[in-house]
Amino acid sequence: MSVLLEARRVTKVFSAGPFARRRTVALEDFSLAIADEPPSITAIVGESGSGKTTLAHLLLGIALPTSGEVLYQGRDVRRLSLVERRAFRRDIQVVFQDPYDSYNPFFKVDHVLQAPIANFQLAKSHHDAQAMIVDALEAVGLRPEETLGRYPHQLSGGQRQRVMVARALLLKPRLIIADEPVSMVDASLRATILGSLRKLSQDFGISLIYITHDLTTAYQISENIIVLFSGSVAEAGDVEQVVPQPKHPYTQLLISSIPLPNPKRRWGREGDLTETGASQRMPKQGCKFANRCPYVMDECRLAAPPLFHLDANRAAACYLYETAPSLTNEAMADVFVR
């Protein structure tokens, strides 16, 4: 399998300074591989502080790992030549959470579409550049005549986000990293934006890494899913296995927190996983989820569980499944991401 982008046993630690004693492990021993082809859609799911955005920054080369490697076509992104780095910037595109932060309010939205064309010399003439912009806008469901010539504040949040998707599409990338792309737009527009991303994957052969805290949208759009808790993989595998029948207690918590359209149902039941008071504190050793888990055992507090290979396309880091064969995070990249 030819791999486009890979995170190999990546750890990222933040500290207040070179002599600071307080250190925060944002991501720990994480591995992921995205194949050159066929295109895939992988969701990275977790609550705030789970390491999702840190992962996005590492994959984009914005941040450097404390240990481990991020590889583009087998080459460490820290050691890419100028030509390789230019190809990396074109192949790996990003759509961030807040589209407004991506715009200069003094420029019309045309500017964010014209810049990549000029920077990467994608068009031979102004006429060709305009044709490319029109095609990209139409591909994400926008009408060029209602979009071009306007300032960012004159467009809705959903329109601004779709313009950023169109900008990424102009470069004909092989992978788009979408970091919470619908969390800042109205619920009515989320399906439209996610539908645009999925259509781009199908029509143009673009892989997606969809980063979100929302399991509902992750289930709608993705094929593979990785559930993060406090920087570590809790569960990973085929989304059709993980979401309908979650194995890890943390994944079960996420699933149970999704409200159902039933006015008589209480949101949360007696015996549900709690996250109040002292239980929120992270244990100093062992399983990071131990203080919030109703199934905690003595061994959970002694050492962090490895990933146990439960099914052909699923693993969970929980001692409830210690009779299953263990799997390293690095091996997970080969097994679960297709």
Image (cartoon, rainbow, N blue to C red):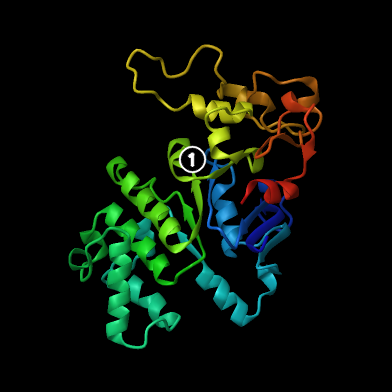
Q: Determine whether, in the image, residue 324 is placed left or right of residue 281.
A: right
- Report x, y in % for residue 209: 52, 53
Identity of the amino acid at label 1?
His
Q: Residue furthest left?
A: 145
| Residue at image coords 54%, 39% | 239
In the image, residue 196 sits, relative to residue 218, either above or below, namely: below
Q: Give the quadrant of residue 115.
A: bottom left
From the image, tell me which residue sits under label 1: 213
Q: Quadrant of the rendered structure where residue 95 is?
A: bottom left
Q: Position of residue 294 (x, y in %)?
A: 65, 18
Name the residue rendered at 32%, 62% in the picture.
139
Q: Residues within 10 Å of mark 1 (few under 14, many from 20)?
A: many
Q: Residue furthest bottom?
A: 124
- The x and y percentages for residue 79 are 69, 74
Compare residues 5 and 76 and report the one nearer the observer: 5
Q: Position of residue 286 (x, y in %)?
A: 76, 32
The residue drawn where x is 81% and y is 29% is 302
